[in-house]
Image (spheres, grey):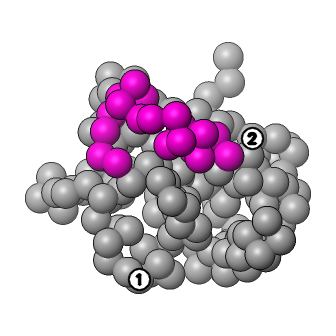
Amino acid sequence: MERLWAPWRINYVAMPEQDKKGCIFCDKPVANDDKKNLIIYRGKFSFVLMNLFPYNNGHLLIAPYKHTNQLSELNSEEKLELMDLLVLCQKVISEKMSPHGFNIGMNLGQVAGAGVKDHLHFHIVPRWDGDTNFMPILSDVKVVSEGLEQTWEKLKVRFDEMMLDA
């Protein structure tokens, strides 16, 4: 069994509850500061943003604007756009970052590992051969080789180009 170690995420896990108030998937889109909030793309029903506490470079989150934790509460258009955005994210990350594979998934409910249990969202995490190394094991450190701002710029440019071509 392989394990994905993410000890650097302790910064989020240990964050005081008062700092976790609100819903990031509701609050960030209305803030109208996409770069600060790491929002890469806004669709009609959903949006894409970078994970502030990534498991790997290029870790994206795709969420509907509708505040729900149930897939059954999304209409057909909302579900279709979420899936279309998953495909788009995989394509953009593949072109700009050349990963060897992806972890794509959704955790529904706290017991299933949802960090934000009240607002469903997909994770898309690019993976590279050897992206798990000795650093997390020996020194409780994860090496993320590119800053969030640089990755945002790289991916945002390609998202914008692809939307112009559509």
How far apart are labels 1 and 2 at the CA level?
28 Å
Residue 157: in sight, yes or no? yes
Tag 1 residue:
33
**Residue visible at 38% across and 81% down in the picture:** 32
Q: Is residue 108 magenta?
A: no
Foreground: 138 or 62? 62
The part of the chain drawn in magenta is: 66-84
Judging from the image, what secondary structure is the residue with disc 2 in?
strand
Query: How many residues crowd around disc 1 within 10 Å: few (fewer than 14), some, or many (20 or more)?
Result: few
Foreground: 81 or 30? 81
Question: The N terminus lies in which quarter of the figure?
Answer: top right
| Name of the residue lying farthest toward the top | 1
Question: The C terminus lies in which quarter of the figure?
Answer: bottom right
Residue type (three-letter) at the residue carrying disc 2:
Phe
**Residue visible at 67% across and 60% down in the picture:** 57
Seen in the picture, residue 92 relative to 115 is either above or below; the reply is below
Tag 2 residue:
102
